[in-house]
Image: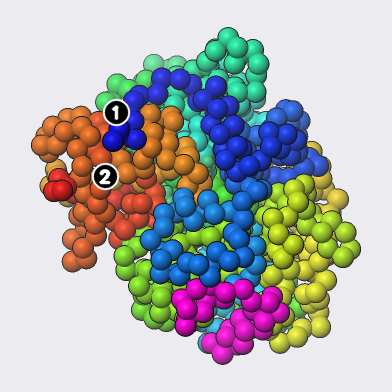
Amino acid sequence: MADPVTIKPYKGPAGGWGSAKSLTEILLREQIPLSGGGLLLHQNKPDGFMCVSCAWAKPAKPSVFEYCENGAKATAWEVTRRSIAADFFAKHTVTELEGWRDYDLEELGRLTEPMRWDAATDTYRPVPWAEAFREIGTELRALAPKSTVFYASGRASLEASYMYGLLARLYGNNNLPDSSNMCHESTSVALPESIGSPVGTVLLEDFEHTDCILFFGQNPGSNAPRMLHPLQDASKRGVPIITFNPFRERGLESFTNPQSPLEMLTRSETRISSQYLQVKAGGDLGAIYGLCKALLEADDAAQASGGPRLIDTAFIAEHTHGFEAFADSVRARTWDELERHSGLPRAALEQAARTYGRSKATLGIYGMGLTQHRMGVETVQMLVNLLLLRGNVGRPGAGICPVRGHSNVQGQRTVGITEKPELVPNATLKALYGFDPPAEKGLNTVEACEGILDGSVRAFVALGGNFIRAVPETDLMEPAWRKLRLTVQISTKLNRNHLIHGEVAYILPCLGRVEIDAQPGGRQSVAMEDSTACIHGSKGYAEPASRHLLSEPRIVAEIAKATLAPNERIDWDRWGRDYASVRDAIEATYPAEFKNFNARMWQPGGFRRPIPAADRVWKTPNGKANFIVPRGLSADPDTEQADPDVMRLITMRSNDQFNTTIYGYDDRFRGVKGTRMVLFMNKADIARLGFRDAQSVNLVGAAQDGIVRRVEGFRVLAYDVPAGCVGGYYPECNPLIPLWHHAERSKVPAAKSVPVRIEAAHP
Ligand SMILES: Nc1nc2c(c(=O)[nH]1)N[C@H]1C(S)=C(S)[C@@H](COP(=O)(O)OP(=O)(O)OC[C@H]3O[C@@H](n4cnc5c(=O)[nH]c(N)nc54)[C@H](O)[C@@H]3O)O[C@H]1N2
Ligand SMILES: Nc1nc2c(c(=O)[nH]1)N[C@H]1C(S)=C(S)[C@@H](COP(=O)(O)OP(=O)(O)OC[C@H]3O[C@@H](n4cnc5c(=O)[nH]c(N)nc54)[C@H](O)[C@@H]3O)O[C@H]1N2
Ligand SMILES: [Mo]
């Protein structure tokens, strides 16, 4: 049999003809007529629907086709003509389905009716909505509030999320973990201490005014492709883009705009990065220290010779605190240790620092490559330190720009999906709804996992997502999960989390955002917040996948009614069918952020909620922007091993997936076709460890905690990655991540430097 797997380097640009072809394939597979392009014309438009893929900013003046390959794939995935036939579950036991791959489960198409697991037959069986809500309510009322978790994956709208947060608090807990707990929680902990804002300060316009971009650990070609447009424009203006990434990602090297006929016909490419630094996994603290060191050395020299200063002394004096201590810590670091930790030569760091030192307005952009480390919080703060040295926060063309993941993950936090009671306007909630919101801190993702493992968590309600597949420590989590009393999954597609289920288990299928949400009072719209804190309205255009589906706000309302004592100040029925009334409640709860919400959400480009740091107002305890000295240099202090055979595994996304949703088995930009079980490895490491290219290997966890962690069946792929680092795909690699291996201060699982050993597989 011919090897279905092919691996060859991809030389083309991101975007371009490869992107057009890949999109056509998925539209055909999901049986969406190419005139379905008509639907795509509404994507990310002021009167259209907001993309269900990433959270990247939506411009006020969109182009005719304001979508990317992966955004269109996500739309196609949601409005697919495929759906799960009524008799499907009768034919397949849950135990059988557990053996199916993620891809095959979701490829079945949309879930169409509410289902309850039937123990006698081990199948999911249809159940009337009313009965489902009644039983869920009865179960939840029987449990101690502390033992229930209300998870949210970052896609649900501001309206559904607000209602969901309130449901948890009225029920009696702050157990509101969010996908953000696995993602940008490092940002949400780091930035308030540094600049007094939990989110970035950058707007899309800033890309037009910047003259230098520092780009850390984010893969825009696959994960935020619309960002390639402003990056391309900046590059064409001659703006240097300095990238720090262990992988040479195609989207950060070269881009052809698939929506420009001229670029497509002439096959013209724009180079994106002007300098590409293949930092070691977890080496960013060292790398940024290096930039700061080079800058301070140049500044010392300038001072000695009476030349212009390299640091913004006026800004530092007026706006910041902690500069001296920080400068001392920079000077105390030796180039030797910085080179060793970052894996980058001093000369390259000095070159990058010279470019930065010439800039008048720099953007610092980053993603999971910084946040998903043991020192994720410190690394984000270190990037802010670098920006503060030259006053690069709070002026046009400059700022800190975390690239958020799910399309409304940032917004969910804004409207109260958080385990931290201090982030919630509890006094306002009390005034509005006449109850005392729980004051005790709730569970985040890692703590929810701990509670499931030790049996203190008994019920898990999920507003979207595929929690069991997304979290670390799969092999311990799955058996513990089965001991839960109640699992409720509000979902669009079948995934592994439905198959690994509790004693009483429900699947509640919901409308997606691309679909028309018809309610008695008329068609409803929802709102979401993008990565730049702009809030947009979104209206569905596609016919719903089934007439049995309910909307997310309606499902949350029904669970609330079935579970909570009646509250005369909350009309759940009205909220569940008239979302403008929920937006009024959001505005009443957060008047500064959501002033005139219902009118402003349709403003082209959305409305920006106030971000004080963007105006140099620092909402930190000392009223200043703070330089913060990190506690160390290594991303993974406690797994730092002298043993050179222990590798740092980076777990990441392919170009053909959205988190645990697998669209296909190709990763075009990395040249992989037909498999996800590859291990990207440096050539010298392959030779040193006695392997060869294409050999079959297994990965074994190398954390010394007595737990055996293993994933078998990878194929070694010689690749341009720094020595000591290997790469593999998420979620296949998740059984290798210890639950305790998380960012120390934010508890984001440290998925980007997992200690592993590689063994030859013996067939
Ligand atoms: N199509 C598509 N879009 C998506 C998603 C998706 O799965 N598919 N997921 C969404 C979500 S929820 C999120 S959070 C975002 C995720 O988007 P990204 O932040 O891009 O996430 P990853 O793919 O995990 O990869 C991060 C990048 O970091 C690099 N990296 C790894 N370790 C390090 C390191 O130590 N230092 C540095 N400097 N770089 C490192 C990797 O090589 C990779 O290029 O995308 C969102 N958008
Ligand atoms: N090893 C490793 N692990 C990681 C990561 C990593 O980089 N490496 N990344 C982490 C990150 S950044 C994140 S955000 C998490 C993601 O974790 P989750 O957000 O929990 O996972 P998703 O894969 O996005 O969830 C997919 C499911 O959501 C449901 N869904 C889709 N659309 C809708 C909708 O409109 N409404 C509802 N109710 N349901 C819907 C579908 O049933 C689908 O199967 O994973 C984390 N896990
Ligand atoms: Mo994410």
Is 151 situated above or below 103?
A: below
Label 2 vs 1, first from the N-terminus: 2
Question: Mark 1 belongs to which amino acid?
Answer: Asp
Residue 720 numbered mark, or none: 1
As drawn, the residue found furthest toward the right would be: 521
Is 579 situated above or below 15?
A: below
Q: Position of residue 278 (x, y in %)?
A: 33, 30
* Quarter of the view holding residue 101: bottom left
Look at mark 2 in the image and give the residue it sits on: 714
Q: Position of residue 698 (x, y in %)?
A: 21, 49
Estimate the spatial distance between the alpha carbons at disc 2 and disc 1, rounded to whole Å. 18 Å
Identify which residue is drawn at 36% across, 68% down: 477
Q: Position of residue 21 (x, y in %)?
A: 55, 27
Identify which residue is drawn at 63% across, 47% down: 80
Locate residue 461 relative to residue 60 in the image: left or right: left
As drawn, the residue found furthest toward the bottom would be: 142
Magenta region: which residues? 116-143
Identify which residue is drawn at 54% across, 12% down: 268
Look at the numbered disc 2 and give the secondary structure of its residue: strand
* Quarter of the view holding residue 480: bottom left
Tell me, yes or no, whether the two marked residues, 2 and 1, touch with CB atoms within 8 Å. no
Locate residue 563 relative to residue 319 in the image: left or right: right
Identify which residue is drawn at 36% across, 51% down: 732
